[in-house]
């Protein structure tokens, strides 16, 4: 139950993905303030959030969950975390396992 006097703030990692972007929309519709983390890229793309009118209750932040200091900063003043950020291409994980460990294991630890 959301107290209308004080909006709860949610962090959604992986907000640029299909599921994460829909979760952001759902949380906003339910009255949450949302801090949406998208993976930084040189195109300044927000992935599935590109083109969405999410309003003033969404703060989109580009960054990387592999950076523990960054994760400490973005989790400040957060009531609940939905951690969806991960590398998912299984065949490539056999070729570059360290990148998957860094993101999926260490990144989860950082969050």
Image (cartoon, rainbow, N blue to C red):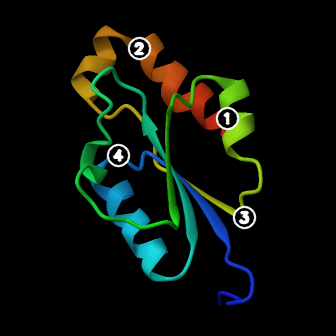
In the image, taking residue 77 as reference, residue 61 lies left or right, namely left
Q: Residue at x 71, y 46 (%)?
A: 75
Q: Secondary structure at mark 2?
A: helix
Q: Quadrant of residue 93?
A: top left
Q: Which mark is residue 31?
A: none
For the residue carrying disc 2, how many other residues have a C-alpha within 10 Å: few (<14), some (14-19), or many (20+)? Answer: few
Residue under numbered circle 2: 97
**Which sits earlier in the primary sequence, circle 3 or circle 2?**
3
Residue under numbered circle 1: 71
Residue under numbered circle 3: 79
**Which sits earlier in the primary sequence, circle 4 or circle 2?**
4
The span from disc 2 to disc 1 (Cα, nearest Å) is: 22 Å
The span from disc 3 to disc 1 (Cα, nearest Å) is: 15 Å
The quadrant of the picture occupied by the N terminus is bottom right
The quadrant of the picture occupied by the C terminus is top right
**Which sits earlier in the primary sequence, circle 2 or circle 1?**
1
Residue under numbered circle 4: 16
Would you place residue 94 above or below residue 110 in this image?
above
Residue nearest the observer in this picture, 13 or 52: 52
**Which sits earlier in the primary sequence, circle 3 or circle 1?**
1
């Amino acid at each position: 139950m959301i107290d209308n006097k004080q909006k709860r703030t949610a962090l959604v990692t992986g907000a640029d993905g299909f599921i994460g972007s829909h979760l952001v929309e759902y949380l906003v519709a339910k009255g949450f303030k949302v801090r949406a983390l998208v993976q930084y890229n040189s195109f300044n793309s927000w992935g599935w959030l590109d083109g969405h009118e999410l309003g003033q209750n969404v703060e989109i932040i580009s960054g990387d969950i592999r950076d523990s200091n960054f994760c400490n900063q973005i989790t400040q003043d957060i009531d609940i975390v939905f951690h969806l950020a991960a590398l998912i291409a299984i065949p490539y994980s056999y070729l570059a396992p360290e990148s998957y460990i860094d993101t999926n294991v260490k990144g989860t630890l950082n969050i």
